[in-house]
Structure formats: structure tokens, C-alpha cells
Image (spheres, coloured by chain):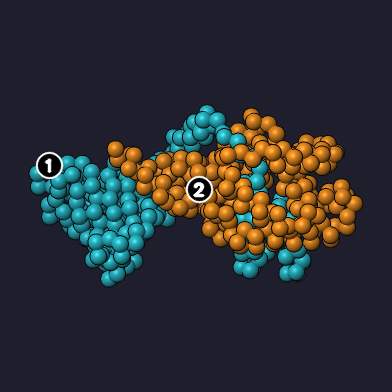
Amino acid sequence: MSGHDEIRELLAPVALGAATPEEEQTVEAHVRRCDACAGELAELRAAVGELAVEVPQVEPPPELRRRVMDAVRAEIDARPAPLRPARRGAFGWLRPWPVVAALAVAVAALIGWNVALQRGNGGEGRVVAVASPAGASGTVRFLDDGGAVVRVRNLPALGPGRGYELWTIRGGKPRSEGFASLGPGGEVVVSAADLAGASAMAITPEPLGNVRAPTGAQVVVIPL
Amino acid sequence: MARRRHREELARLADEDLLVLADRDQAAFEALYDRHVRVAYSLAIRLLGDRQAAEDLVQEAFLAVWRGSTKYSQARGSVRTWLLSIVHHRAIDRLRQSSAMDRRQGALEEEARAQRAQDTADTAIGRVEAQAVRSALAGVPSDQLEVIRLAYYGGLTQQEIAEQLSLPLGTVKSRMRLGLERMRRNLGGGEVATA
């Protein structure tokens, strides 16, 4: 078994790709247990990566972008369902819901866009942007008291007596948080009092007064 | 309109955030591609010396990043470092598939030639970044740089470098380590910021 110092000697060759496969495996196994070596290897790799900037830069052909994006689209199309098993942790809660026309689900992209609110409207907490492929977009403001305010625009118009309901999901079970009618610009503003223990928030179109369980398809899903 | 706004929002995100989104949001992946494709492609061309092979390799590397996006761990380094290490690793694998003999003979000559080309081909693209890296390299003793370049660009293992330069293996190892550590310090302990 190699000692710590011997492993450290191997970090540079591994970062440069100049170690044997056996040495590489030894180092990979070691850094899984040793944070100090893992950190050092990451830094050496970063330095090695910068060697790539040193080479004469060549503009890639536009066809390459098309090829790569076509390949990604082909893989997405080949997925058995829009929600992959790998996502079970985040979206497993979708399954117990009835009427989940999975194809209709527009999963919001949770954007790690942290806005410094000190510069904003005097609010508190952290704001992240959300956007769904269907074109809805907005913000989630996480309040210091553990709650959140969700503001989403461009939601589809609904019939009379209907609005949008915000749910929090805990252990696969939805809990109603608030209801709002659609305002100008297809905007709703709904808030959740407490996000403790919640794995996600979701917005569904619902008839006024329905608070037991969601009936509509999720138009916005915000993993937490 | 909504799509354009979405792209503008994405453009403000860090690579790591784009990668989190990439699995579900192709525009996020496109933003990531646009940021890093040039350096990845240039590296692939430099290593493989062939445009078609470089294109194939870059496609492969970006797909590997996309597929691995849900497993990415920041502890392993930045997204860019990860992408470039995939390009490098796979290019070296391909180089090693070619005859080891050819490679050893060619590596030193190629290094000398490429170094000359590099000194004159200071392209406008990426000049600032390249200068930052070159000044970081400038502080590294030439014997250390030599082993680093033979490994990185030539795909030689440390044993092969030792044979090639008639040096003890221990010397090659320590030159690699000292050289990389010096580079890391000269680069400010982290990475050069990208435009």
C-alpha cells in the first residue's frame, strides 16, 4: 500500500496524464479519502488546464456546434420519458400525483442566479430566477423567516373561477401554500409560509378553493 | 422574446450553474459550449494535429460533460478544467494507440517545432489569457517546463520522458511537481479568469 508521501509524488504526473493507469487508480482511490490531496490535485489540474490557453487559438467551425447540439437532442429524444430515472431524487414526487400528463410538465429551470438584494427593493433573503421551457419565467425570493415568495409571469390564461396554486412537496406529498388569480401579463404572486423539509415547490392551475391535492399539471416546478 | 431574455439570464450565470441546468435546459448547455469550445478545440488540434479528429474529440468531450452533468462535483475543479482534462485525456489515449516508437521519436521534434510556431502565432484571439499563462510559465525553469510539455503535449509517460531525456525517473517526477507547483503559484493559486 502506498504511503501518503508517495501518493503526493504522483499528483503532478496524474494531473499531467503522465502516470500509468495503475498509478492513476491508486491516486484516485487515495483522494476519495484524503481531502488535502484531493484539493492539491484539483489545483494542479487547474494549472495544467491553463496550458491549453497557451496553444495557438483556432476558431472552431460552426458545423461543430450543430453536430454537438444535434447529438444532445438525439440523446434527449431517445430518453424513455421526459423524467429520467436519474432524476428520481428530485422528481419522484411527481408520480403519486394523479393526472400527471408527464409530457405536459414544464419543469422550471432553477437558475442559481443570486441577486444581491441590498441593491434591490429593500427586500430580504436570496432571489433566484426561474424559467420554464414553455416561456414562463420569474423569481423566487427566499425569505429569512423560512418562507418564500414566488412571482411568475407569462402563465397561460385560465377560465373563470380558476387560478394558480402553489404547493410545497414533502416526502412526495403536496401541501397547499397559496392561491392566486392570474394578473396582467399572466403574472401570479404566491407565497409559502415555511419551506422547512420541502424538496420542491410546484404551481398548478386549480379551481378556486381546491386545497386538498393538486388536480392540474404542474406548469412550474422548483426543486429545492 | 422570452427565449432571448432567458439566454441573457443564462449568460450571467457561472459555469457551474449552467452545468446544473444543462441536463434539462439545452440553452444552458449551448451557453457553456460557446464559452469553452474555442480553447477545447485549439487544444485538440494542438494534440492531434488534425481538424477532423479534433472536431470528433471535442464533440465527444462536450457530450461527456453533458452526460456527466448530474454527477459533476466542484471539488474536482472547475467545469472548464474538467472539460479540458477530458479533451486532454482522450487525446493522449489516441496518441498512445499510435506506435509508441513513433511517438517517442516525434515528441521532441514536435515540441521544438510547436514552440517556435507558438512564439510567432500570437493570435489576437485569447491574447490576454495566453499572455497571463505565458508569464506564469516564464517563471518556471526550462528543465521543468520541458518535462511538463513533453507530458502534456507529447503524451509521454514519466518513464518515457526519463528514457528520452536520459534522466533518472525521480528527477522527472520532481521536475514535474516543482514546475506545476510554480505554475500554480504564478497563476495565483487558481485559474486565469476567462473573458
Which of the chains bears the disc numbered 1? A
Quadrant housing residue A160: top left
Where does the image place residue B182, in percent across and percent down from the top left? 70, 61
Q: Position of residue B82 (x, y in %)?
A: 58, 50
Q: Which residue is mark 1?
A: A159
Which of the two residues, B83 or A88, is positioned nearer the viewer here? B83
Instruction: Give the colour chain A carries in the figure.
Output: cyan
Please indicate, yes or no, whether residue A102 appears anywhere in the rendered image.
no
Q: Residue at x 82, y 42 (%)?
A: B108
Disc 2 residue type?
A: Ala
Instruction: Please say whether residue B38 is visible from this viewpoint.
Output: yes
The crowding category of the residue bearing disc 2, from other C-alpha atoms within 10 Å (few below 14, some 14 to 19, many at least 20), is few
Q: What kind of element bears circle 1?
A: loop
Q: Nearer the viewer, mark 1 or mark 2?
A: 2
Q: Kindly give the residue lying farthest to the right in the view shown.
A: B166
Q: Residue drawn 57% across and 34% down?
A: A59
Tell me how many marks there are.
2
- Mark 2 — on which chain does it sit? B
Disc sitting over residue B195 in the figure:
2
Q: Where residue B97 sits: x, y (%)? A: 76, 38
